[in-house]
């Protein structure tokens, strides 16, 4: 089997993508991918798809952080691929899935809110991201906005209403680091550099809703490459009340993000794809 990265032949239906270890043939002409960070969320998302729409799912690859399953419902095939944590590893997943024919990307993640009115288990639908990452700068200068596709935003809202889960729509701060970038001094060094000190208060004051680590890379890449991108995250903590992520909060936020994203597929498959 040839790897795409080392091969310039035009027909790469049978060539494996170097990192995802997938061929175009394997993903059966699918045009949409759901992208969690954690590989162990892939089967959870597939189970939710089968629960809401019926159909079947099959795991087709798992290499490093990139685990992929295919969900087949009625006439649609949905790819679910984990991206790992952060912009650099996510950028590889997006590049290779786009080369395989995927045109719509929805990140399903977890997040900590920074606004006091947001509760654990709510979901946040990102309209645009503060680009506190490095990977997106390899795709567009910093002045370029990291914005979500409006049709995907609409579909995610539709999914939240259908699921009866509280949702918030707005701006996300997307940071390369979990500790200093999100102003956590509960780290090994207990140190946050001067440039990042006070950033949580500042984003809060500027009506940013939450922190996560991948949306700025995803949304910048999708806009630059003419693809549809969206991001939904389930709230597992609220930094306005301190740092205390509990096991049951993680489960609730994770499950609600998945439920809403999967519910939004009905609208996406009917009206967009
Ligand atoms: N993901 C993040 O990046 N930050 C959090 O606080 C929770 C999830």
Image (tube, rainbow, N blue to C red):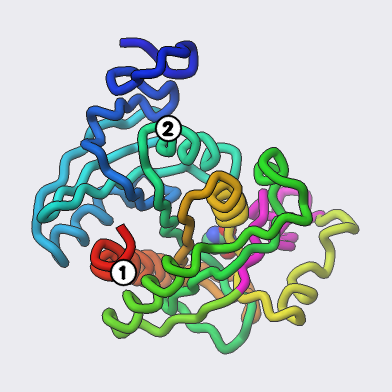
- The magenta segment is 171-191
Q: Position of residue 219 (x, y in %)?
A: 56, 55
Residue furthest out toward the right: 194
* Disc 1 target residue: 264
Location of the N terminus (image quadrant): top left
Q: Residue at x 52, y 49 (%)?
A: 226
Q: Residue at x 51, y 34 (%)?
A: 92
The one nearer the camera, 119 or 147, is 147
Per the image, label 1 sits on a secondary structure element best described as helix
Q: Is residue 112 left or right of residue 71?
A: right
Mark number, residue 99 = 2
Q: Residue at x 86, y 54 (%)?
A: 193
Is the residue under label 1 in contact with that under label 2 (CB below 8 Å)? no
Q: Position of residue 83 (x, y in %)?
A: 45, 43
Q: Residue at x 62, y 55 (%)?
A: 216
The one nearer the camera, 13 or 230, is 13
Q: Position of residue 195 (x, y in %)?
A: 88, 58
- Kindly report the secondary structure that dominates the magenta region of the rendered protein: loop
The answer, for residue 223, to whether it is visible in the render is yes
Location of the C terminus (image quadrant): bottom left
When the figure is inspected, residue 43 is found, relative to residue 201, above or below; the finding is above
The answer, for residue 247, to whether it is visible in the render is no
Residue furthest out toward the bottom: 117
Closer to the observer: label 2 or label 1? 2
User: Whereabouts is ligand 1, in terms of quadrant?
Assistant: bottom right
Rounded to the nearest angstrom, the CA distance separating label 2 from label 1 is 25 Å
Disc 2 Cβ-to-ligand 1 distance below 8 Å: no
Q: Position of residue 48 (x, y in %)?
A: 21, 61
Per the image, label 2 sits on a secondary structure element best described as helix
The one nearer the camera, 193 or 221, is 221
Q: Is residue 249 left or right of residue 269?
A: right
Q: Residue 271 occupies which quadrant of the picture?
A: bottom left
């Amino acid at each position: 089997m040839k790897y795409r990265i080392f091969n310039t032949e035009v027909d790469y239906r049978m060539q494996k993508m170097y990192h995802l270890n997938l061929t175009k043939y394997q993903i059966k002409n699918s045009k949409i991918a759901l992208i969690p960070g954690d590989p162990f969320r892939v089967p959870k998302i597939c189970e939710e798809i089968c629960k809401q729409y019926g159909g079947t799912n099959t795991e087709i690859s798992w290499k490093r952080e990139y685990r992929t399953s295919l969900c087949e419902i009625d006439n649609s095939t949905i790819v679910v691929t984990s991206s790992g944590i952060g912009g650099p590893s996510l950028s590889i997943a997006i590049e290779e899935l786009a080369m395989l024919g995927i045109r719509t990307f929805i990140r399903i993640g977890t997040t900590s809110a920074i606004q006091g009115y947001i509760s654990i288990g709510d979901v946040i639908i990102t309209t645009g991201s503060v680009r506190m990452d490095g990977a997106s700068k390899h795709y567009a200068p910093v002045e370029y906005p990291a914005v979500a596709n409006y049709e995907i935003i609409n579909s995610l809202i539709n999914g939240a209403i259908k699921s009866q889960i509280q949702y918030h729509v707005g701006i996300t701060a997307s940071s390369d680091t979990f500790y200093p970038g999100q102003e956590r001094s509960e780290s090994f060094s207990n140190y946050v550099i001067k440039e990042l000190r006070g950033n949580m208060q500042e984003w809060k004051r500027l009506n940013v809703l939450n922190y996560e680590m991948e949306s700025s890379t995803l949304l910048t890449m999708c806009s630059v490459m003419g693809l549809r991108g969206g991001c939904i995250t389930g709230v597992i903590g609220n930094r306005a009340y301190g740092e205390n992520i509990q096991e049951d909060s993680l489960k609730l936020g994770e499950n609600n993000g998945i439920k809403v994203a999967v519910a939004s597929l009905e609208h996406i498959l009917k009206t967009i794809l």
